[in-house]
Amino acid sequence: MKVADICQIIEEVAPLALCESYDNVGLLVGDPRMELRAVLLCIDVTEAVLDEALQKGCNMIVSHHPLIFRGVKSLTGKDAVQRCMIKAIKNDLAIYAAHTNIDAVLHGVSGRMAEKIGLLNTRILEPRSESLLKLVTFVPHSHADMLRQALFDAGAGNIGNYDCCSYNVEGYGSFRAGEQAQPFVGKKNEIHKEPELRIEVILPALRQAKIITALLHTHPYEEPAFDIYPLRNEWKQVGFGIVGDLKEPENEIDFLLRLKTVFRLKALRHSPLLAKPIQRVALCGGSGSFLLNRALDSKADIYISGDFKYHEFFNAENRIVIADVGHFESEQFTTEIFYEAIRKKIPTFAVRISDVITNPVNYL
Ligand SMILES: [Zn+2]
């Protein structure tokens, strides 16, 4: 087991390409070829977590928040981040982060919060836009099934809860093979007309390379024709926040008290209550106040997130209840996602969740 193997497992759940442009995710410290003894999972990398990793014999840390977020131009140990980097390097500790890329997936940070609360029919609160493409290709009937399947296997044709989606129209293609060509059908230097299917599939931009490779590999023609169009559609499986419904409406006080239990809270900040039951719940792990309008649009009765400022509570305007459960508290279950992903692939590998509470916010 190498560092790169753990990176790959996490990236199957949370592809690096899904991170926000300002973010810094992936392997931050260490050699991907290093042999691993054990991995420690945490939300924040602190000096205490590094000590814990060393004490427990772990030589890789997987965290939610990236240790290095901004550019480092010198490495002198002048702050905690640099001290952690130096300590990690001196002790052959690899450090990896999955941040906004694991926020962005349906079963990521917010999805795990929704599971803990017991939400049903969950969907992304703010689906990502301009991340989808349309692929159109033209193939003789003999190879249509095989090509379609290859595109699906490579990740094309997923729409909501459906996969293997395509649109197919009959037509014919024309071409004249040149002297150097090796045509699959037709003769050199003669215009040929071949009955073909026009196949259209939707695909995430991040899978484009893999899908085009599958097309080129499967299409029988020497020069397969294909077009790629950018789409403005929202990608409903990827984006920030989650909205879902409770099985039964719950009294708002009872629901808030349940949140305190689920998220192990000493205190919970909330906007004025509305004296109506809670059934639809919107939420976002971390600092999610920017999604309040999305929560309102979704007709949620409550919006749960962290880091709401004083004035932002006014924006509830008796239309929704805002519940601030705290940044760390909202993301505390993210380590479970890492744990399950690794254990699912390698059931016997030594992977541990940190015992250090790194939350810098305390309540008296
Ligand atoms: Zn966070």
Image (spheres, rainbow, N blue to C red):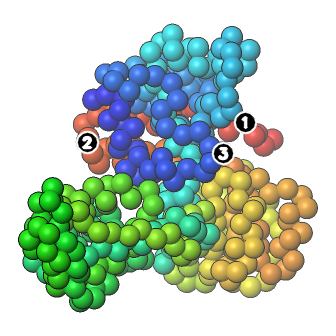
In this view of the protein, can residue 43 be seen by the observer? no
- Residue that label 1 marks: 360
Question: Considering only vertical position in the picture, is 220 above or below 12?
Answer: below
Q: Tell me the kind of residue under disc 3.
A: Tyr
Q: Indicate the position of residue 102 as horizontal and vertical percent values.
A: 51, 52
Q: Tell me the kind of residue under disc 1.
A: Pro
Q: Which mark is residue 347?
A: 2
Q: Residue 81 carries which label?
A: none
Residues under labels 3 and 1: Cα distance? 23 Å
Q: Which mark is residue 22?
A: 3
Q: Nearer the viewer, residue 54 or 278?
A: 54
Residue found at x 48% / y 12%: 91
Q: Tell me the kind of residue under disc 2.
A: Pro
Residue found at x 25% / y 36%: 348
| Precedes in sequence: disc 2 or disc 3 | 3
Question: Considering only vertical position in the picture, is 227 above or below 73?
Answer: below
Residue found at x 53% / y 33%: 355
Question: Considering only vertical position in the picture, is 83 above or below 225?
Answer: above
